Image (spheres, rainbow, N blue to C red):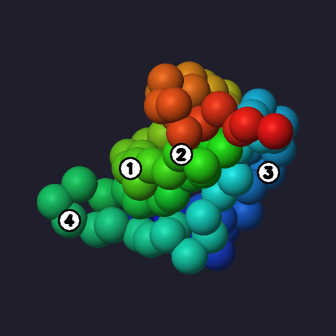
Amino acid sequence: MSLSEHEARRRLRATLAAVAPDVTLDTAAVHRVDAPFPGVAYGLRLGHANALLFLPLSEIDGEGWEQRLATRLGQAREYLQQFPLAQVRS
């Protein structure tokens, strides 16, 4: 796996800022996974809802990763919105 955790964090942060600015990346939860499937595990927060998710390496690296990652993070936001804790109460 050629993608470093630092670069994965950078890509996740930048893409979240563009497609889901209300979702927060848990930078401490970003970890490379080499086996059994190469990819990146990462944590997201929306309101008080948290999720630990996994991206296959092909979704965050290689040609066209920007669009694939944007699609996946948009889907992650939709997933988080389903949790009652995602609704921030004032």
Where's the C terminus, which quadrant? top right
Q: What residue is pinned by disc 3?
A: 14
Q: Secondary structure at mark 2?
A: strand
Query: Residue flagged by tag 3: what amino acid is it?
Result: Ala
* Front tag of 3 and 4: 3
From this view, report whether residue 45 is shown above or below residue 83. Answer: below
User: Which residue lies at the image location 51% right of the left edge and 57% below the top edge?
Assistant: 43
The x, y position of residue 26, in whole percent, is 60, 64
Circle 4 residues within 10 Å: few <14, some 14–19, many ≥20 = few
Q: What residue is pinned by disc 1?
A: 54
Q: What residue is pinned by disc 2?
A: 49
Q: Is residue 57 visible?
A: no
Q: What residue is pinned by disc 4?
A: 35
User: Which residue lies at the image location 64% right of the left edge and 43% below the top edge?
Assistant: 46
Q: CA distance from mark 4 to mark 2?
A: 28 Å
Residue at the far left in the pictured view: 36
Circle 2 residues within 10 Å: few <14, some 14–19, many ≥20 = some
From this view, report whether residue 16 is shown above or below residue 44. Answer: above
Which picture quadrant has residue 40? bottom left
Which tag, 1 or 4, sits closer to the chain's start?
4
Q: Secondary structure at mark 1?
A: strand
Q: CA distance from mark 1 to mark 2?
A: 17 Å
Q: CA distance from mark 3 to mark 4?
A: 26 Å
Q: How many marks?
A: 4
User: Which residue lies at the image location 53% right of the left edge and 45% below the top edge?
Assistant: 49
Q: Marks 3 and 4: CB-CB under 8 Å?
A: no
Q: CA distance from mark 3 to mark 1?
A: 17 Å
* Front tag of 1 and 2: 2
